[in-house]
Image (spheres, rainbow, N blue to C red):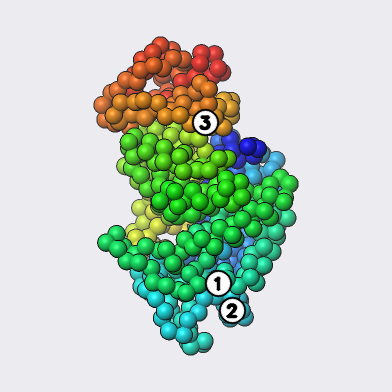
Amino acid sequence: MGTSWWHGGVLYQIYPRSFADGNGDGIGDLEGLIGRLDYLEWLGVDGIWLNPIHPSPNVDWGYDVSDYIGVHPDLGTLEDVDRVVAEGERRGIRVLLDLVPNHTSNRHPWFRERPDFYVWSDEIPNNWRAIFGGGLAWTLDPEQGRYYLHNFAPEQPDLDWWNPEVGAEFERILRFWFDRGIAGFRIDVCHALIKDRELRDDPETTQGVQRVFSMNRPETHEILRGWRALADAYDPHRVLLGEAYVLDVNEWARYYGSGSDELNLAFGFALLHADLDADQMCGVVAETEAALPTGAWPCWTGSNHDIGRLATRWCHGDGALARCALLVLLTLRGTPCLYYGDELALAAGRVPPERVLDCADPPRDPGRTPMPWTRQGGWRDPWLPLEDTSRNVEDQLADPDSTLHFTRDLIALRRRLPDLQTGAYLELPAPEGAWAWRRGEDVIVAVNLGSSPTEIGGIEGSIALATAGCRDGERVAGRLLLAPREGLIVVPPGSAS
Ligand code: GLC
Ligand code: CA
């Protein structure tokens, strides 16, 4: 297997409107991001993924794109993107953009000029349901007198990927950004591109509707293979990171193709949906490791702009658990993707009903609130409220025992230990509530997610990093004691420095 920068690297997801505001209008932007690249370099990330930066009426905050090769004026200009790329490169940080190929905005010129780019029907043809709003995925367009398909909001008509001209347009879009030095794409709902040609009903079961005809069609893999060939033709190869939102791990693993001809990376949604529980997580990882084809590389994340923040979802505000979660994400085999604020153990923001801006129910705004840079927040009238600044960059930078420093130390340790970057994963026996694994030859990670102290046998070495800092450097001779909500990394003596 050839190794690319992202195999051992750490990704960091940025929600541009909420990351950093360069011009003080309350909306995060590219200028603001450039101003924070030093922070990201200090943290040690290798790549950033930006949620959509394109012109958009913002019905779904950028996921309703009206121009794929432009930049939303709230966020900046094309020249600003070039500067993000160049300034990132100087700091060893690559830039991934978000590609939204399943649907456009209904205000994209294609919707009127190229109706053949979309999926139409004279009558409502089936039971497909929209993900937003809960109604049918078909809406009558008065101008056409026909119904168009929208798997998401009515303002997000689905493209017809059976039309080769749609594919040709997207090839142009990929090349446009790759030529500008973009390192790759996160691909939005990449499992949904092709719809059943006969528009058959999705089966409805007691667990709800199974989206097997409106999404998840086998022909989608062909499109991904084409993009992979395109990305691999660039030097350096561009990376494709897919949002294949498929919870069946075997079905999900198919988006890696043979292991080297479809996605390079796919978010592991099964882990994202698990609880922070040793049994559940260890099970998901075992299943994932077994399902992936040779050469395929997982991608782990605990938070994002849809599902919310790990500090709240997994840890219910418990700081010790948040460190355990970060330890897990950053030491499994695979590329970790942190969400801005994870490094502070940032919790979900409070967004009162009158400030809600999201179209989904429940709204996703609490996971999208502004990054607290200072004790005062560091924002003027931000677009989403920033109320709780108790966890902020300023304070945590000044405190060597903070979660921020812990995350940075963990990333630095990954850099020093090649086993932590690219070593194989081997599960080790551990008592209930605990989970332990080996990476490569001799790095051991152990975490106790339970509420009583525990002990793992057969472990030798010294503690290179622990969630409770006071244990760094401690020798382990056979028995490793773990307090509740504690995790650590054990290495052979002498290899941690
Ligand atoms: C993806 C995005 C989500 C968006 C949806 C529709 O799931 O992550 O934010 O609403 O696609 O584009
Ligand atoms: Ca701004």
Image quarter of the N terminus: top right
Helix, strand or loop at disc 1?
loop
CB of mark 2 within 8 Å of CB of mark 1? Answer: yes
Point out residue 208 in the picture as x, y percentages from the top left corner: 31, 62
If you read the primary sequence from the N terminus, does the residue marked by circle 2 or circle 1 appear first?
2
> 494 and 265: which one is in front?
265
> 355 and 50: which one is in front?
50
If you read the primary sequence from the N terminus, does the residue marked by circle 3 or circle 1 appear first?
1
Q: Height in image: 39 above or below 74?
A: above
Helix, strand or loop at disc 3?
loop
Point out residue 305 in the picture as x, y percentages from the top left corner: 45, 53
Query: Mark 2 to mark 1: distance in Å?
Result: 8 Å
From the image, tell me which residue sits under label 3. Answer: 424
> 460 and 305: which one is in front?
460
Cβ of disc 2 within 8 Å of ligand 1? no
> Residue at left 54%, top 62%?
219
Tag of residue 99: none
Tag of residue 116: 2
Point out residue 374 in the picture as x, y percentages from the top left corner: 48, 42
Query: Mark 3 to mark 2: distance in Å?
Result: 47 Å
Point out residue 421 in the picture as x, y percentages from the top left corner: 56, 32
CB of mark 3 within 8 Å of CB of mark 2? Answer: no
Q: Is the residue marked by circle 3 packed among few (<14), some (14-19), or many (20+) residues within 10 Å?
A: some
From the image, tell me which residue sits under label 1. Answer: 160
